[in-house]
Amino acid sequence: MKSRPPVGAHLVPSMVSRGEMSAEEYIASMFERIGRLDSSIHAYLQLDRDGALSKARALDHRARRGERLGKLAGMGVAVKDIICVRSLQATCGSKILEGFVPPYSATAIQRIEREDGIVLGKTNLDEFGMGNTTQNSAFGPTLNPWDLARVPGGSSGGSAAAVAAGMASVALGSDTGGSIRCPASFCSVVGLKPTYGRVSRYGLIPYANSLEQIGPMGREAEGVSLLFEAIAGHDPQDATSSPEPVRPLSAGGIEGLRVGRIKEFFGEGAQPKVKEKVMDGCERLETLGAKAGETSIASLPYSLAVYYIIAMAEASSNLSRYDGVRYGLSVEKGAADWNTAFAKTRSEGFGEEVKRRILLGTFVLSAGYYEAYYVRAQKVRELLTREFALALKKFDVLLGPTMPVLPPKVGEKVTPLEDYLIDINTVAANLTGLPAISIPCGFVDGLPVGMQLIAPRFREDLLLKVAIAFGKEQGLESPPLGEAA
Amino acid sequence: MDAPQVERLAELSRLSLSPQEAQRLRGELSAILEYFAALDKVDVSKAGPTEEAAPGSLREDTVRPSTPDEILSGVPQRKGRYVRAPRVF
């Protein structure tokens, strides 16, 4: 049996369409890898082997009859378990959703299936997307395929680990404050957080509605680009999705592209070797024809406080829906009154981090504190948005390290606040709604480093163009999984 | 943040905390709030009212096929086609 899926993900649809490769064999090889590797990585929470193989067989059949297949034909897609897929249990990495099977699929899933992409299963995450390690899951941690003693990042850590280890062609994650880009950086894959409103959030179980987006992940930017084009675009089911047309990727390289290094992204909180690696990445963009310079975003040091205040406020309101009455866990079957039953189910169903965020969110929205925290945070968010808009007048894209640190060790003891601090470079894109991408930029001490690029609203095409050009120059390495590549 | 404050927040949040949990959270929440206080230093006088993202367009409110049986099948406690809830009074 082949140990690695034989081709780049983006080549699969044309090969399957032309009958040069069997979708069934390709998907079966993916499940073979999952069977062999995932007991040590734990990227998946649930697999849909039978469903995926039968869809693949149907595609081969249609290809033989000369039918035209969709743009994702035969690609195996791993789906973060916070995105609804009809008939597959959805857990959000939480005990509170026990037994919940969504009666519908998210718009992003419907669009993937319309283009003949194949859902392989649901991937692990920090509970409700709250974390950057994928260790806060009620179903156990996911480990980093590059070093099983390290975290894969989060919260879309299962999706990142799955594509890094070749256990999926591409994957869907969601990004509220860096949850696609952080694990992409730590697992050496490409992860795109689209512009707010670019991808429908219908069927994405909400954590912080004004910040989050579903986005694509993959080993190579070409596959990420295909998946992005399939899921992007207006959806009547999500009133915040934009009618703005999706820009297709333009041909050509990145000659003359103006790249602005954000000074604050290279601040003292970042590990020196990580900074050097990303500076080196920026220089390599220059050898590809880009023109680099430096810029400053004065309010950036405040972005983390702004982000956590807003995200926690929205979370406390969103998660009030889990009452143990309509779906999910219900621990109190006796004659307790409403509030006691409600509190008991929630206390047993939610993990520590979720409780922390609900409590703080409730605090910043409560009378007497609302103005000082929530309203003030919204104002600083506004300043930050203006500063980014100004910087993006001088530069086409902005650049910095995705994560200021290398992937932390599993079980490393840190306080909640220390844990939040490593999100310092990713949260601004969510607060401003701007699209951002993390692309593999090489290794320090054998551990992946990601380079982040931020573009103007709806210019994912620019980010993907840079990622494709840089990826060709960078080349592709595979994690050491005790096998010949 | 003091102990009664944590207790009040837990009540508002519909969470019941064990004494150890409440004790630990008190320290953690205080440290995080101290970090949030950095925003006091920002001059926000020039920040206008927050620009809310206006919905692009709202869809027509039309009746579409639904799946009530599927939805009801996920309810933890039922009596026929009714959802059973804890008493309110």
Image (cartoon, rainbow, N blue to C red):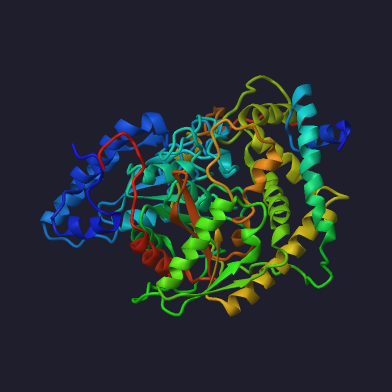
Residue at x-position 82% and y-position 46%: B34
Give the quadrant of residue A190: bottom left
Viewer-proximal residue, A152 or A442?
Answer: A442
For residue B18, above or below residue A480: above
Residue A101 is left or right of residue A429, and the answer is left
Name, please, the residue furthest toward the left. A65
Residue A318 is left or right of residue A151, and the answer is right
Give the quadrant of residue A306: bottom right
Residue A321 is left or right of residue A90, and the answer is right
Quadrant position of the C terminus of chain A in the picture:
top left
Name, please, the residue furthest toward the top. A334
Residue B48: percent from the left, percent from the top? 78, 72
Residue at x-position 74% and y-position 34%: B14
Residue A146: percent from the left, percent from the top? 41, 40
Residue B44: percent from the left, percent from the top? 82, 67
Marker count (numbered): 0
Residue at x-position 68% and y-position 68%: A297
Give the quadrant of residue A138: top right
Quadrant position of the N terminus of chain A in the picture:
top left
Viewer-proximal residue, A77 or A407?
Answer: A407
Q: Is residue A346 among the parts visible in the rendering?
A: yes
Residue A126 is left or right of residue B88, and the answer is left
For residue A343, above or below residue A63: above
Residue A483: percent from the left, percent from the top? 27, 36
For residue A168, above or below residue A248: above
Q: Is residue B62 among the parts visible in the rendering?
A: no
